[in-house]
Image (cartoon, grey):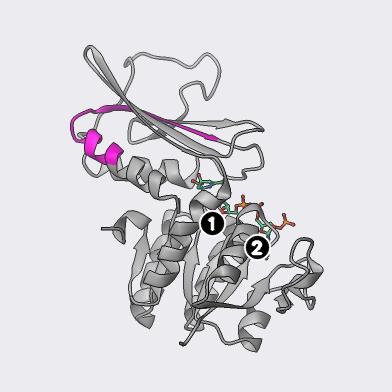
Amino acid sequence: MTKVRVIIAGPRGRMGREAVQLVERTDEYELVGAIDYKYDGKQLSDIEGFQHIHIPVFGNIEACLHTVQADVLIDLTTPEVGMHHTRTALLHGVRPVVGTTGFKKEDLQELEQICHEKELGCIIAPNFAIGAVLMMKFAQMAGKYFNDVEIIELHHDGKLDAPSGTAVKTAQMIAEVREKKTQGHPNEKETIAGARGADYEGMHIHSVRLPGLIAHQQVMFGADGQTLTIRHDSYNRASFMSGVKLAVDTVMKMDVFVYGLENIIE
Ligand SMILES: NC(=O)C1=CN([C@@H]2O[C@H](COP(=O)(O)OP(=O)(O)OC[C@H]3O[C@@H](n4cnc5c(N)ncnc54)[C@H](OP(=O)(O)O)[C@@H]3O)[C@@H](O)[C@H]2O)C=CC1
Ligand SMILES: O=C(O)C1=N[C@H](C(=O)O)C[C@H](O)C1
C-alpha cells in the first residue's frame, strides 16, 4: 500500500495536535514532516505530548518542501501564514487541505487560479465538522424562503479571526439564494458601535467570544409570526477530524480548487 505522505503546519496548536494524532493513527497516512517556527531543526518528539513521534520539524515551508517529499499539506495556523503555506505547497506540487480561517476573497481567487494552472487539488474548509457543514446547507435551504437572518457564532476566546470562517461561509451560501434585503428598521441607529454586528449583504453576523466555548453557531430566520433556528455545536476538536480525513482522501483524487466541504460530501 502506498501511503499518503502528510505534512502538518501548526502541530502545537489546538487543531494541529488533534491532526497529528489523526495522521498517526491512520494506517494509510504517513507523517513526514511538521512546520513550526518555534521548533526549527528539532523533532516532533521535542514538543510536549509528542515524545514518541520522531519526524523532523522545519521553521518554514520552503525548508520543509526542500527536504521532504510529501503529497498533502494540512494547514492549521493563522490566515497570513496559512495563505503563504498554501500557495507555496501548490507551487511545489503538494496538495493543501486547509482548515485555517480568515482568508480574503482575493486569496481564494489566487489559490483557485494556481490550482487551475497546476491542475492540482486543494481543499479550503472553513469547518471540517460534518454537522456544521449540514447546518450551513440547511441554512442555505431556509434562506430561500426567509429573507431575514441573523448569524450568531460563538467561540473560545483564543480565536484570532472574527467573524468566524464558518459564519462568513454561511452568509455567502445564504446570499446565493436569498432575495436581497437590508434588515431591521430603515431608520435604526446603533447607540453603541457594533451593536447590530457585521453586515454581509444586509444580513447581520454576531461574534461571541468566551472561555468555556469551543465552536458553535446559530442561524436564526424570522418571518411574520415565526422564527426558525438552526444550530450546531462542536464540544471538542475531535469533532473536526472525520472531515479532515475526508478532505485528505478526496484531495488526493482531484485536480480542482474546492472551498467548503459541502462541495465534496454527497
Ligand atoms: N476548519 C475547521 O474546521 C477549523 C478551523 N480552525 C482554524 O484553524 C486555525 C488554527 O486554530 P487553532 O488550532 O484553534 O489555533 P492555535 O492558535 O491553537 O494554533 C495555531 C498554531 O499555529 C502556530 N503558528 C503560528 N505561526 C506559525 C508558523 N509560521 N508556522 C507554523 N506554525 C505557526 C501557532 O504557534 P504560536 O501560538 O506559538 O504562535 C499555533 O501553535 C485557525 O485559523 C482556526 O480558525 C479551527 C478549528 C476548526
Ligand atoms: O477557531 C476555531 O476554533 C474555529 N474556527 C473555524 C471558523 O472560523 O469557522 C471553524 C470552527 O468554527 C472552529
Figure quadrant, ligand 1: bottom right
Q: Amino acid at mark 2?
A: Gly
Residue 149 within the segment the image draws in magenta? yes
Q: Is residue 102 visible?
A: no
Q: Amino acid at mark 1?
A: Thr
Alpha-carbon neighbours of circle 1 within 10 Å: few (<14), some, or many (≥20)?
Answer: many
Position of 181 relative to 61 (above/below)? above
Position of 152 relative to 70 (above/below)? above
Residue 32 figure quarter: bottom right
Label 1 sits on residue: 100
Residue 198 is tagged as: none
Alpha-carbon neighbours of circle 2 within 10 Å: few (<14), some, or many (≥20)?
Answer: many
Residue behind label 1 places its C-beta within 8 angstroms of ligand 1 = yes
Residue 216 x %, y %: 49, 36
> Which segment is the magenta one?
138-154
Residue behind label 2 places its C-beta within 8 angstroms of ligand 1 = yes
| Residue visible at 33% across and 14% down in the picture | 185
Residue 10 figure quarter: bottom right
Depth check: 215 or 190 in front?
215
Disc 1 element: loop
In which quadrant is the C terminus drawn? bottom left
- Callout 1 touching callout 2 (CB < 8 Å): yes
Label 2 sits on residue: 10
Residue 113 x %, y %: 37, 72
| Residue visible at 62% across and 45% down in the picture | 160
